[in-house]
Amino acid sequence: MQGSGYVWKRVGFAVVTVFVALTLNFVLFRVLPGGPVSQISRVPNASPALKQALIAQFGLDKPLWEQYLLYLGQTLHGNLGVSYMNRQPVFDNLIEAFANTIPMVALGTILALVIGIAAGVVSAVRRGSAIDHLSTNIAVLFYAFPTQFLGMMLLIAFAGILPAAGMNDPFAIGGSRWDAFLDMLKHMILPVTTLALTLYAENALIVRSAMLETLGEDYILTAKAKGVPRGRLIRAHALRNAMLPIVTMVAMSLGAIVTGSILIEVIFSWPGIGRALYTAVLKRDYPMLQGGFLAITVVVITFNLFADLIYHKLDPRIAT
Amino acid sequence: MTLSTPGTPSPELVVRFGFWPMLRDVVHQPAALAGLAIVSFFTVLALIAPLIEPYTIHEATCAVFEPPSWQHWFGCDDGGIDVFSLVLRGGRISMIVGATATLIAIGIGATVGVLSGYFGGWLDVVLMRVTDYFLVIPQIVLMIVIAAVWGPSLSHVIVVIGVLMWTSTARLIRAQVKSLRERVYVKRVEALGASHLHIIVRHIIPQVGPLLVANTVLAITVAIFNETALAFLGLSDPTAITWGTIMEHAFDRAAVSSGAWWAIVPAGVAVAVLIMGCYMLGRSIEDGLNPRLKVSYLSLHGWKLRPLVGRGPDAV
Amino acid sequence: MNSALAIQDLNIWFGTDVGVRRAEFHVVKNVNLELAPGERLGLVGESGSGKTTTILAAMGLLTSNAEVSGRIILDRKDILRDGELSVAPHRWKDIAMVFQGAMSAFNPVKTIGWQIAEAMQVHGVARGVAMSRRIGELLELVGIPADHASRFPHQFSGGMRQRAMIAMALACEPKVLLADEPTTALDVMVQDQVMKLLVRLSKELNLALILVTHDLAVVAQSCHRAAVMLKGEVIEQGRVADLYHRPKHEYTRKLFDATPDVFAAAQAPRRVSTPPSEVPQNAPLLDVRGLSVSYLRSRTFGDMVRGRPAEAPVAVDDVSLRVKRGEMVALVGQSGSGKTTTLQAVLGMIRPRGGSIQINGRDVTSLTSRQWRPLRRQVQMIYQDPYESLDLRYRVRSTVEEPLRVHGIGATAKERETLVSAALDRVGLTPVQRYLGRFPHELSGGQRQRVAIAAAIVLKPELLLADEPVSMLDVSVRAGVLELLNELRADSRMGILMITHDLSTAANYADRVAVMHQGRIVEEGDAATVVRSPRAPYTRALLASIPHPDPDRSGFGDSAA
């Protein structure tokens, strides 16, 4: 019973945050001077008919609050407008882009987590040893590399060996489904490696210090006194407690994941949400930009909520 | 702090108190010294860049994508401009952007953190709610949107990074100030009749000072990182030369497919080394401030036996 | 010779890295201890005496910067012989330990039952159904219902956690139990229960027990023998009664003298007497009437929706108190009794919900913090923990000078320096010149507390509030600080309101005692009378739970020695 209060609180917070993002979106694009929607004339290649349609759609002839309500209603119905570029509904564009992004980002993030936690734990347990120094220094190095730099270096290094752009080979027609899947995997190697390397570094450093903190706690001494063997001590006591800061870490790194995947999709021409956002900026495709911002924000807020709920599961001390 | 009681601290666990001993510990770490050396080196380089750059960056001085040579250490870019000179110049602006954005962020963050943590109550609730929203919304995307709406410009980049980056500082400082607020010596000074301003200026800020310094140094890494990311996405001023725009320009002009790695590597390595320096310095200060990291009950080697004279085989 | 455990010629050194320098401390020097099955030995000493390090060494639990030599003989075998290798098999199976802070000694994310089970699992003592039954038995043995095994440590009270810790220690049926300050953070009544439990278990299970503590009275009531440690050495050991009646070492005598004895205080007249009747009977300095305080809990959004008020249950209820000039009043109670809250209200840090507080005839009940500021010259406070109450970055001079600056007293630096020196001289930090430039970490606990007192009396207050002023100090320096307060009362005619959990301290130094329980004052009166013939049942229970330093008086085990 105690716990459900916490769950509802976090869900409530997530919902309110989505509204904040929605409002921010509205303010940025409509209210602020120079907001692109208010200057509808900026739309490239717009025919008078389209302009008329846009003014009607956004309700630009109505007072601001009515526009806001209209905007909220439309957004909640999934109507994010029409992309200036390909004249497709923004919503459909976003779904397609996300479908492409998710496998790549998920794989990269999971790899980064696994490697990061392993490296961090080994470092902390063997604190001060050569392995610790080596692992920490490598992590600092990768932490310091800008993602786009790392990506470009990998591109140059593996030019001709691994596919460098897109998520499949446009000339490979007629292969089986399995071939297409293998082809996509091959295309994923470089982007996923770049993402994993960028993210792993910070994970490793945070896990190391979280583990070091728990290893200094009194209950570790108690467990050692009980005769708990080393492996179990690390797993069941130290790592189990260090999971709390690690979950927080993952939640906090959502921003970094988003940044990394945008840069990587641009470098490797991966047709995902990041690249869609980038193209929208270049082409001044405001409905896409607006929709992309909203979509990414909602996804991040959702994962943040997951992290909160997992934290709650892991820590019995959280009551309300 | 849990209850501490007489007779508890065993001498090996006693943490050295005091500000200066802590600072001394920090300075004695090799990582801190290395970091400090790197940061100073880059700062000096940025200051004297115009004096030492070998070529002008405004006109071509060699062939397109000319590889590195004795004349042109880092080769040339697509416009035949000397990359070494470019990187020297780019560092200047990148570091100014990074430092200014960081100062804005730290200024906002520290103010929010101190007010929120010290006064608590509804002020704390309101400020922390706002912080929470800013924390959850993916900043780079918001930066992209804002930069796209306002148009690309260096000052926009600074303001956008600065105004969006303060949240973690605010949280950190708030937590610290909140715990300081509960410390007995602060309560004692309050009971002496001191004003809030006196307490904040004389007792709170000096205590969070070192942490703020560490946080500032670490925040610079994020600011520079974000600057290069925004520049790479074409949201920085295209005419300004920064490490970010140098990389973006090279990528844009197919340096990658031409194999002209020298157009990218120097700027990238410069960013990496500077970030590494800031990180090492910042982390060393932070670790030095965290007494909990000084004890580990699970060391690689346990305690040792020291043989005593007379400890024969028939000891029992 | 049939000993359960023998420690022979134990020496321990710690190496530390101080910046780039390396230093070595010889922390335990040639310690020899021996105890028979079922015997209870008290290991007594002040902070830094090496007593905890000694028993940690017996379990091989030292950190990697430690070097050990000597023998730990268990079952006729030297378990130190091959270092970690030879100690490890005996941990928990033969020697188990009860740690000091049971809150931090339990893993916070695992249930109590899980943690007890773990001890049995790793040693293969029990498994399956037998194990869960054993967990239930163990918990019931220490007086915890068996179904509490599925609870988490934070759901237990302090005393229960310590009992659960004992249950866990007994899981593998050890022959020797080491207890490191097992009751230090606990209230005296809970301490009484836990000590009775330890003594009972030692008798029933024929368990050899080493009790590490700074409290001689606890040892006197629970142990057969005691060993006194000072600076890493055992300076004296023997039967408890011998140590009490015929201490050989000067330090042992000093420790016993400093141990408060509530019963002696009740018999003998007060140490220093200035009859309060000599005080001119004008209006009391502090007059608290019908004070009640309830803590404000910040209202959550849910509270507002449900219309729940923001106030929590009452913390202080209808408390009335008076302190006259030159009088020391002690407010006695256990943690959570509301005594600290009362003090906070008098200091104007908490707004009372009802009642009135008058200082020097002026009603201060509803002053704002700004209105309070000039008044603070008259009312000063001394805090419990001298390690916490001083800003570590301030030298003694600046710490004592700060109140003068805050109130704009003393026009010139020289004038202020004179006042600072006078205050330091008053609290006995002489020669003053030696202390002015020091930082807190260069002072001992007692000296720090004197600096804190100097910073309070430099304003020449009329009312001094003291929050457990000696409970964080080593036993041997407590008397000095209390004596100083007594002098301030007698010579400077300050009124002192002291709160303490220790009825003995109150009985020894206060003119009047008020006993607080659950937010109310349950008994009030002349100090000697309250101790000698308590009327309230709570006071009687409190008195009964105080351990007596004389081992011949009945104690935890009824016939311990």
Image: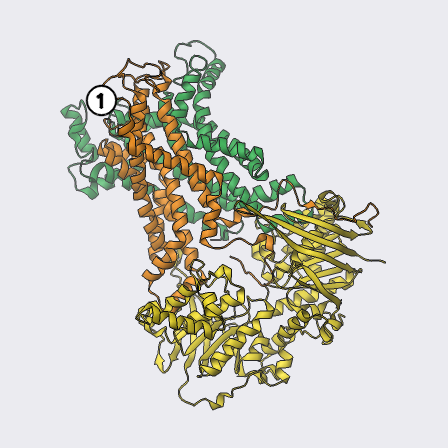
Count of picture labels: 1
Residue found farthest to the left:
A48
Q: Amino acid at mark 1?
A: His
Report x, y in % for residue C231.
65, 61
Question: Residue placed at 67% from the left, 74% from the top?
Answer: C548
**Picture colour for chain B:** orange
Instruction: Say which chain tag 1 marks.
Output: B
Question: Residue placed at 70% from the left, 51% from the top?
Answer: C59
Q: Nearer the viewer, residue C123 or C286?
A: C286
Report x, y in % for residue C135.
70, 53
Name the quadrant of the C terminus of chain C.
bottom right
Residue bearing the label numbered 1: B58
Q: Which chain comes out yellow in the rendered image?
A: C
User: Does residue C63 lie above or below C408 as drawn?
Assistant: above
Give SS at disc 1.
loop
Splitting the image into 4 quarters, where does residue C531 fall?
A: bottom right
Q: Which chain comes out green in the rendered image?
A: A
Report x, y in % for residue B157.
27, 35
